[in-house]
Amino acid sequence: MLVRFFVLLVGFGLSVAGGISLLAYMNYMAAGYTFYSYVEFIVHRIEFYIFVLGLLFIAVSIYFPQRMRGNKE
């Protein structure tokens, strides 16, 4: 249970760090980028992969089945 909570917190931290950076890059759209060029730009940035990795950690910590200990009948 404690490991799942730790993975959830790490995933949350990674997704927040990556998401804030991706939102900051949205200022490029005001400078003349289209939405397609913005998406093309962020796909090649490391912050995008940090954001996706954080979302993956969150999903794994929520949906990964927990082992039952104790009574094995």
Image (cartoon, rainbow, N blue to C red):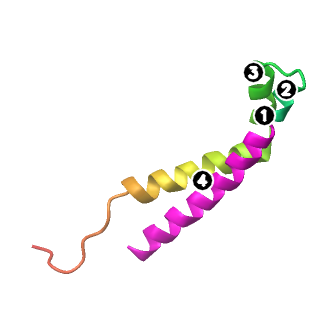
Of pointers 1 and 3, the one earlier in the residue sequence: 1
Of pointers 3 and 4, the one earlier in the residue sequence: 3
Residue on which disc 4 sits: 54
Whole-number angstrom distance, CA of label 1 to CA of label 3: 9 Å
- In the image, 28: left or right of 53? right
Residue 30 vertical placement versus 19 (above, below) = above
Residue on which disc 2 sits: 30
- In the image, 61: left or right of 28? left
- The residue positioned 75% from the left and 21% from the top of the image is 35
Residue on which disc 1 sits: 26
Whole-number angstrom distance, CA of label 3 to CA of label 4: 23 Å
Whole-number angstrom distance, CA of label 2 to CA of label 1: 7 Å
Mark 4 vs mark 2: give the one in front.
2
Q: Residue furthest front?
A: 30
* Dot 2: element: helix
Look at the numbered discs 2 and 1 and tell me whether their residues touch, using CB distance below 8 Å. Answer: yes
Q: Residue furthest left?
A: 73
Residue on which disc 3 sits: 35
- Name the quarter where the C terminus is drawn: bottom left
Instruction: Name the residue nearer the viewer: 58 or 33.
Output: 33
Q: Amino acid at mark 1?
A: Met
